[in-house]
Image: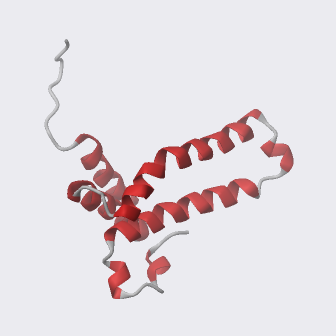
Amino acid sequence: DWTATSNANLTEEELNDKPKRIYRYFKSLLRQWEEDLSQRPDAVKRTAAGKNETKTVKQCKDYIRPLFQQCKRRDLSDDLQTHLFKIVTFCEMGEFVKAHDAYMDVAIGRAAWPIGVTM
């Protein structure tokens, strides 16, 4: 359960360190996900669905690695950093609908999409 209480031990400087907060939040989610999967019974782990879940975690870790590297190097673009920080902050507060809206802003933006236009 990752809520704002997860930040209780952070200093004011750490709370405002956007790349570090983004990195820590997503890293902790990955750890929690792995821990949840490791606690499954062996019978579940051996099923096709269980193996698929394990592969999905590994794939996610591979795909998120460039983001983690950019956070460590503090090489995130300001725009992306701002949006990701919003997403993390909303998730920590338990405001998942707002986090989803912030994700949609970064993924597709707010521009009007023409309806019925084909190539």
Indicate the position of residue 31 as horizontal and vertical percent values. Answer: 60, 61
Indicate the position of residue 84 as horizontal and vertical percent values. Answer: 33, 58
70 to the left or right of 111: right
Q: Residue at x 24, y 55 (%)?
A: 77
Q: Nearer the viewer, residue 96 or 69?
A: 69
Farthest right residue in view = 43
Dividing the picture into quadrants, the one containing residue 71 is: bottom left
- Residue 53 appears in view: yes
Indicate the position of residue 60 as horizontal and vertical percent values. Answer: 54, 45
Q: Nearer the viewer, residue 116 or 54?
A: 54
Q: Residue at x 79, y 44 (%)?
A: 45
Indicate the position of residue 53 as horizontal and vertical percent values. Answer: 66, 42
Farthest top residue in view = 119
Quadrant containing the C terminus is top left
| Scheme by which the image is coloured | secondary structure
Quadrant containing the N terminus is bottom right
Q: Residue at x 47, y 68 (%)?
A: 24
- Residue 95 appears in view: no
19 to the left or right of 24: left
